[in-house]
Image: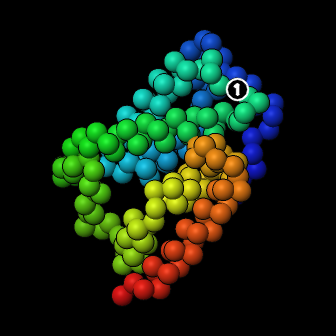
Amino acid sequence: MREPEPAAKAAGPPGDPAGFADWVGPHLAAMARLAARLAPAADRDDIVQESLVRAWLKRRQFDPARGVPGGWLLAITADQARKARARGRPVTLMDGRRVAGNDPPVPGPDAATPASLDLARALDQLTGRQRLAVDCLYYADLTVAETAAVMGCAAGTVKSTLADARARLRQLLAESP
């Protein structure tokens, strides 16, 4: 896991568009990974763009004393991904297949091994809170503190939620055929 961002980077977002772009730049890859994990049937770039618009409009609400830029931006991304899932828009995948917004993408011909399919099924059986914690920490490569900011809870709650999720995954994967 990565270390939290240094306090020097925790200044508020600049008010000019170029400065804001530089401020969010280091977090774009994590925002895209989180959007793809939380709303796999939606267009992750649309979610990131909607998140950036929201962050720009709310930039004066960022409080460096309450968290780091990455955590704040990823919390916005998680919220936008939730909204995208709820909208359930159909999406056309690159290979031309259409997927309903609430359905998981249909795997392509070379998409997955049996082990990854078992893991995907097991992840789908976690509670929403457990899934969010796993997605943030393991797929979006956030720290426990950043995951706590995204989830709106204490770091200890994240650790407890992850412990429960890992125990449930061990149980589900042991039961897999």
Q: Secondary structure at mark 1?
A: loop
Q: Is residue 117 or residue 88 the one in the foreground?
A: 88
Image quadrant assignment for residue 72: top right
Please name the residue that numbered disc 1 is placed on. 63
Residue 26 visible to the viewer = no
Q: Position of residue 20 (x, y in %)?
A: 60, 20
User: Total number of numbered labels?
Assistant: 1
Left/right placement of residue 44 relative to residue 74 reads: left
Q: Position of residue 80 (x, y in %)?
A: 43, 36
Q: Position of residue 48 (x, y in %)?
A: 45, 35
Q: Residue at x 43, y 50 (%)?
A: 38
Q: Residue furthest top?
A: 16
Q: Is residue 43 or residue 64 the one in the foreground?
A: 64
Q: Position of residue 156 (x, y in %)?
A: 71, 56
Q: Is residue 149 or residue 99 the one in the foreground?
A: 149
Q: Residue at x 63, y 17 (%)?
A: 60
Q: Residue at x 80, y 38 (%)?
A: 6
Q: Is residue 27 above or below residue 153?
A: above
Q: Amino acid at mark 1?
A: Asp
The image quadrant where one finds the N terminus is bottom right
Q: Is residue 89 above or below residue 159?
A: above
Q: Is residue 133 or residue 6 the one in the foreground?
A: 133
Left/right placement of residue 6 relative to residue 174 reads: right
Q: How is this picture coloured?
A: rainbow
Residue 64 visible to the viewer = yes
The residue carrying pointer 1 sits among few (fewer than 14), some (14 to 19) or many (20 or more) residues within 10 Å by Cα, namely some
The image quadrant where one finds the C terminus is bottom left
Left/right placement of residue 25 relative to residue 96 reads: right
Left/right placement of residue 5 relative to residue 151 reads: right
Q: Is residue 140 above or below residue 134?
A: above
Q: Residue at x 21, y 43 (%)?
A: 90
